[in-house]
Amino acid sequence: LKSSLAAFAGPPMLAAFAAAAAATSQAHDVWGTGVNTTGWAVFAITDFAIGGLTKAPDAQVEVIVEPKMSLGRPEVSHLSKVLYGSTSGVFDLHVYLPADSSAVTVNLYDHCSWQEPGELIFTTRYDLADCPAEQSATQGCALAWQEPVELPPLLAAKQFPWHPWAASPGERSARLLGYHATGAEMVSRVRVASRRGVGVQFEDVSRDPARFALGRIQNDAIETQLFFAEAGSVFPEALHGLWWMDQRGVSLKDGPYPSDPEYTQVCLGAAEENLISFGEASWDNETRCASGVRQYSGGPLSGHWTWFDESGNGESKPWSSGADWILKYEFCFSSDDFDQIDVRTKITNDALGEITLPTFATMVRTSWGWDRVTTIPDAPAKLTEFLKTASIDSGLADWVQAKFGPGYGDFAASGFACHYPLRQVVDGTGKRTDAYSEYLAYVNMQTECEEASFECPRNRGRGTQLVGRLALPR
């Protein structure tokens, strides 16, 4: 094995990371300063190059995390995106792993959809103990491997002369670059990746929900304990910071917003959830989607979505009942002005694989944040307008309210759509906004109701709330 360990500013890709990190440190620096890094590391494969093949492969890399043999944990596997027809490129595969893991096996494949993961081009193994603990936490260890590509036995016997490897001129070789980091250096690498719109993988290929648990954060320290999309990152400004899902319309209790006096909350329903963040998401400039957002899971240092502690013992019934769904969300801008979002929901089915549900959740930009709308799945605008008019003119809205109770008449009159405000409480520089005090008063309110309702959230958190995170194996 020809591998090397170096300081952070080694290979070209990593040098670029160092420059970005230096620029980041000059900003309003609260990002990640309150996270607990104990027990975790980040391992990445960034760049690759391969030579001596007559045809460019569809390159994909796999990272297999090997636990210490004495712990009896299973291996977990992570896959990169596929770089089609490429002899070089950037995988940008960054993964969280327990810091006490024994080693990492890295496989480079020529991807094949009908024989996954494909034909093995190159494999190597990295012992995490090769990176000194102090260096991994303060500088990180830059990694580089370069190895000859061995012909498969049948090709070596020249039984497949048509194969792209069979008649390769010159030396067949593969080169991989990456890094390994812990502690403060891990947070720095994660931050730089986030600013480039690259999320660190916390779900392995199995997507086992049992690997996640609820962690606890302080209500009044969210800007240091949750990662968020930063100002100056590739994320659109409309996703920067931390957002309060004000599903009970608390910020409207004293009257409408001065800048939008016509806005009202519609529907008397609320989930026991509080904040959403895009700090662990990935951004695709072509599709204009923020992906990788999870309601029930998240990375071990932060997480995406927060919940009330309903018992005071770190428990949330809504989180527990939904964790096995392993939902994925994509927040995709549907307008060139970046003022409308379709929230796409994906579920995984053992028989059918990954399924995208009809769009039933949208977001509309306003002067005060976002109007979060839940409506008839994929309903065209003309249908919604017709339902609004018909419900009012026919008296249906009055009937619905009489039948189902207060609030539901507004639901019918709005075209059978629910609305609630999504308020930014921390901006993209980490500064608290005008809505922060209302958010804090709401989440700090201890309640005594036995069952949650629209009027009474079940909150026993005593100044804290919960978030789904990757947990260390037990």
Image: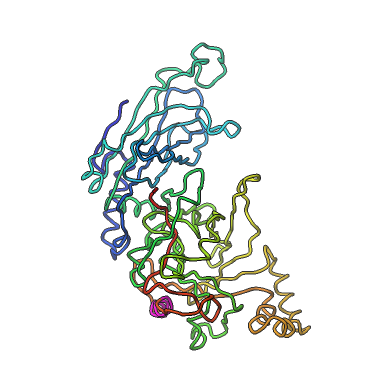
Residue with the most extreme bottom position: 254
Residue 92 pos. (x, y %) = 41, 43
Label tally: 0
Residue with the most extreme right position: 394
Location of residue 175 (image quadrant): top left
Residue 323 pos. (x, y %) = 52, 57
Segment colored magenta: 435-443
Residue with the most extreme top position: 157
The chosen color scheme is rainbow
**Residue 438 located within the stretch drawn in magenta:** yes
Location of residue 363 (image quadrant): bottom right
Location of residue 177 (image quadrant): top left
**Residue 355 located within the stretch drawn in magenta:** no
Residue 405 in the image: above or below residue 152 = below
Residue 316 pos. (x, y %) = 48, 66
In the rendered structure, the answer to whether residue 187 lies left or right of residue 254 reads left
Residue 263 pos. (x, y %) = 56, 81
Of 297 and 90, which appears nearest the observer? 297
- Residue that appears at 29% across and 61% down: 33
In the rendered structure, the answer to whether residue 467 lies left or right of residue 287 reads left
Residue with the most extreme left position: 134
In the rendered structure, the answer to whether residue 401 lies left or right of residue 50 reads right
- Residue that appears at 36% across and 66% down: 217
- Residue that appears at 27% across and 32% down: 4
Q: Quadrant of the N terminus?
A: top left
Of 288 and 30, which appears nearest the observer? 30
SS assignment for the magenta stretch, majority? helix
Residue 274 in the image: above or below residue 73 = below
